Amino acid sequence: MSIQLETQHLTGFIAPEEFESAAPQVKLAHELLHNGAGAGNDFIGWVNLPTDYDKEEFARIKAAAERVKKNTDVFVVIGIGGSYLGARAAIEFLKSNNYNTLKKDTPDIYFIGNSISSTALAEVLEMCEGKDVSINMISKSGTTTEPAIAFRVLRELLVKKYGKDGARERIFCTTDKGKGTLKHLADEEGYETFVVPDDVGGRYSVLTAVGLLPIAVAGADIDALMAGAAKAQKTYNNPDLKTNPCYQYAAARNMLYRKGKAIEILVSYEPCFALMNEWWKQLFGESEGKNNKGLFPASVVFSTDLHSMGQYIQQGRRTMFETTVLFDKPKKEIIIGNDPQNVDGLNFLEGKSMAYINEKAFEGTVLAHTDGGVPNVVVRVPDFSEDSLGQLIYFFEKACAVSGYMMGVNPFDQPGVESYKKNMFALLGKPGYEEQKDALEARLKK
Ligand code: PA5
């Protein structure tokens, strides 16, 4: 079972001959990526990652996850951006957006270090009270401020609770193989480390230890996840636009962008997809948003957001298109029963599944939105299994890379992310930033 792309709701927005004319460009982008001749070519390790990964480390990840499952009530995952979103998105997708409150035999998992909110950190500390805790600190660079602060606080908690030796058994660090403050600290303290490969950027790293350890702790099958991604690696290794749905998606979004659609909205009808939306937004936003170019990635969960954003999408500025992710099979099904009194007037739905009703909600919405001038492309996914998620992750990663090359940007760098950091460091008085401090403070004065 594989992912299908449905393009019929692009009729009237993209002509078939336009699609054909995009084929040479797609082929060129494919070649740039596969020959390693494009911009950012030192960050394309993710292309072959589903089949070419460190098997010894993979076994260590599974072993560490088993130990954590046995001795831990609360697993705290510390990281931000690409060192955060993928793991959380996968756990919510595979398990539940209510994972922590489910009845389960795996630890609760909290994500922290993804903001500088003292309230958020203090709340997680409260969740740890009276519980057995383990932590996974994730930072490729090993120097990112947000997770570094949270790690300092959580490490202190663990050392207080278990002593230095006990804490060592419960602290896992995922970082660069040889350099950076975190790697140095982990080696000094004897923490078990996992590697973020040099040639895999943060937003493409969910299928490395960055995502795999937390996902395995949640009880998901990471072998099946990698197998799904490997299937996608094979399927989408095909330069022919006509037969490659991943490239059809990349081409469609580029054509719509050129026609003035500045915003792409990722739509799902499943609340457990909300964090996947966030992962996707980082993937596409950081990859394409540069050189004054790029689609702005937005997201909604329907039918929830039809009651909030639906109005704008139907009748606001006509600058957007939707990419809808649908699932053939829900995780759990509910069939509508009979009410002899029919007081709520819902007996016309008797015997129908909620999945069927959800599909009708999609059909009604897609027709209304295309009538309203919002093109729609549909990504149809078989189910919520690890295999499907592996395919979907790779589908979006590859589409993003090819799309970025088609747009004429380097899809693997993120120079803009540094600007706020420099200002923040200067304002905090970090050594080395003295000169900027005065100038910035003057600008902040009223
Ligand atoms: O995609 C990216 O590169 C960023 O979002 C990073 O993942 C994020 O800034 C965290 O970086 P690091 O893993 O070095 O702490």
Image (spheres, rainbow, N blue to C red):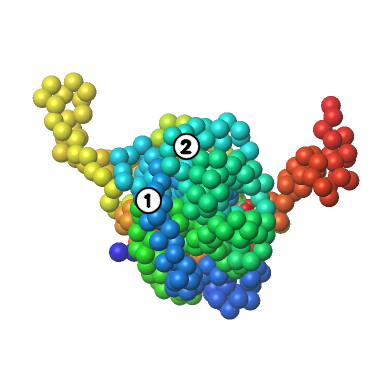
Instruction: Please provide percent x and percent y for residue 383.
Output: 31, 54
Quadrant location of residue 212? bottom left
In the depicted structure, whether residue 233 falls above or below residue 151: below
Asked if residue 306 can be seen in this view, the reply is: no
Asked if residue 63 can be seen in this view, the reply is: yes
- Residue type, numbered disc 2: Cys
The residue tagged with tag 1: helix, strand or loop? helix
In the depicted structure, whether residue 33 falls above or below residue 420: below
Image mark count = 2
Quadrant of the image for the N terminus?
bottom left
Residue closer to the observer: 21 or 359: 359
Please name the residue shown 13% across and 21% down the image. Answer: 341
Residue closer to the observer: 324 or 78: 78
Instruction: Please provide percent x and percent y for residue 181.
Output: 67, 56
Q: Residue under circle 1?
A: 69
Is residue 334 found left or right of 157 in the rendered image?
left
Residue closer to the observer: 288 or 199: 199
Instruction: Please provide percent x and percent y for residue 267.
Output: 44, 46
Task: Check disc 2: other Cα within 10 Å, few if <14, some if 14-19, many if 20+.
Answer: many
Q: Quadrant of ligand 1?
A: bottom right
- Residue type, numbered disc 1: Lys
Instruction: Please provide percent x and percent y for residue 303.
Output: 38, 37
Quadrant location of residue 229? bottom left
Q: Residue under circle 2?
A: 128
Is residue 382 found left or right of 217 in the rendered image?
left
Q: Which is more N-terminal, label 1 or label 2?
A: 1
The Cα–Cα distance between marks 2 and 1, rounded to whole angstroms, is 15 Å
